[in-house]
Structures are given as C-alpha cells and as structure tokens.
Image (spheres, grey):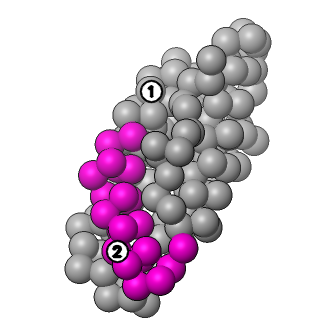
Amino acid sequence: MAFIQFTNQEKVNVKLIDKQHQSMVKIINKIHSNLEKEHQYNCTSDMQNLIDEIEIHFETEERLMKENNFMGYYSHKLEHDRFFNQVTKNFDAIKKGNPEILLEQLSSIKRWFYNHLDLSDKKCGTFLNSIGIK
C-alpha cells in the first residue's frame, strides 16, 4: 500500500491542481518506498524534485486564487509559506547529514497534505469550479 493514497476523495476537481497533487504524492511515495528498501538510499535528488514540485504547485494555486479574487487567498498563501519554509529547512538539515529526520519529515508532509487538502484546497477548488474553472 502506498504511503499516501490519492483517490477521488482527495481531488479538488481542478484538473491542473489535481495533476500536481498526484505528481507530489508520487514523489513522496517513491521516497518512502526507497527508504524502506534501501538502508543507504540517497534521497537528495528526489527531495529536490519534491521541493520543486511543491514550489510550482503553490505558485499555480496562488496565481489562480489571486487572478480570481478568492477571499481566502492570504490565509491560504500563509499556509503555503509556512509549510514550504519548514520543508526546505528540514531538507537542508538532511543534506547536511541528518537523514534521521527524513521519515519524520515524510510523516509531517503526509499529515499536512491531508489537512491542507480538506481544510483549504477543497474550498479553493469549490470556488474555482463555481466560476467555471475545472
């Protein structure tokens, strides 16, 4: 079973956002799977890919919210900024030789992903759907 499941229940029904969520989930699951298989797994490249995907995704969501005057833009962006800063800080620690925090980081990402999806992204998706963005 995958570390993070992405089913129809996790979709926000905005094609681009759902595609980006799926891409991030795929990378997270790859990292988690490789950690379970390989004791000496070097996650640097995969973690950088994840950070790049997160950054692109946040920029996409924020652009869509801003362009369409989504009322929750500022609080949503704040959530993104806090999360991104935490992930990059932890990734820097991992690159400097503290790999023990990687599993903890993945669990934290998983919790954040589901919480953020349910509490913020679905509201944004519903709003975007209501103005014709699918």
Residue 80's x, y, as percent?
Answer: 38, 60
Q: How many marks?
A: 2
Residue at 40% in and 85% down: 131
Q: Is residue 20 above or below residue 134?
A: above
Could you tell me the amino acid type at mark 1? Answer: Ser
Residue at 60% in and 41% down: 25
Residue at 51% in and 35% down: 93
Q: Is residue 5 magenta?
A: no
Left or right of 77? Residue 134 is right
Quadrant for residue 98, please give it. top right
Q: Residues within 10 Å of mark 2 (few under 14, many from 20)?
A: some
Earlier along the polypeptide chain: callout 2 or callout 1? 1
Kindly identify which numbered label has been placed on residue 107.
Answer: 1
Q: Is residue 38 above or below residue 108?
A: above
Stretch of the chain drawn in magenta? 114-134
Q: Are marks 2 and 1 in contact (CB under 8 Å)?
A: no
Q: Is residue 57 visible in this depiction of the protein?
A: no
Residue 128's x, y, as percent?
Answer: 41, 76
Residue at 57% in and 57% down: 18
Residue 118's x, y, as percent?
Answer: 33, 48
Q: Is residue 124 visible in this depiction of the protein?
A: yes
Kindly identify which numbered label has been placed on residue 127.
Answer: 2
Q: Is residue 20 above or below residue 24?
A: below
Could you tell me the amino acid type at mark 2? Answer: Phe
The front one of 83 and 132 is 132
Q: Residues within 10 Å of mark 1 (few under 14, many from 20)?
A: some
